Amino acid sequence: MHEMGIAMEIVEITKASIPEDMKGARVQRVNLQVGKLSAIVADSLTFCFDLVIKDTPLEGAELVIEELPVVVRCKDCKAEWTVTEPVFTCQECQSGNIDILSGRELDIRSIEIEDED
């Protein structure tokens, strides 16, 4: 289960991203973007995240996962479309010469820290 390693890395990146003057603050939410081609199971990642945040500044934080679609562009005719089936040929010219524009992401988009007031 590679989701455990990913969850551990998310925690380390998040802890390192907390500004020095806010080191005692609690993280409320980590917003993540995950592409459909990233081979990440969102439920497994959430489960692992919930395990590894114990006794860290992230304890009790929510992991919000936005799944990004697979978007491709034909190198021959320049058509762009969202892939909804496991077919990677151009819908316009039937070429298999395509670029994947999105769908492989694994990005922390933002980290929300509680306001101390």
Image (spheres, rainbow, N blue to C red):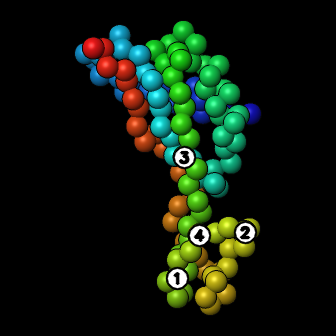
Q: CA distance from mark 1 to mark 3?
A: 25 Å
> Residue drawn at (51%, 66%), measured in percent from left and top?
101
> Residue drawn at (52%, 82%), measured in percent from left and top?
79
Residue type, label 4: Thr
Q: Which disc number belongs to residue 93? A: none
Quadrant of the image containing the C terminus: top left
Q: Earlier in the sequence, mark 3 or mark 2?
A: 3
Drawn side of residue 109 relative to residue 41, left or right? left
Q: Residues within 10 Å of mark 2 (few under 14, many from 20)?
A: few
Q: Earlier in the sequence, mark 4 or mark 3?
A: 3
Residue type, label 1: Ala
Q: CA distance from mark 4 to mark 3?
A: 16 Å
Q: What residue did someone put label 3 on?
A: 66
Q: Where is residue 18 shown, x and y percent of the image?
A: 35, 23
Q: CA distance from mark 4 to mark 2?
A: 9 Å
In the rendered view, tell whether residue 57 sits above or below residue 10. above
Q: CA distance from mark 3 to mark 2?
A: 20 Å
Q: CA distance from mark 1 to mark 4?
A: 11 Å
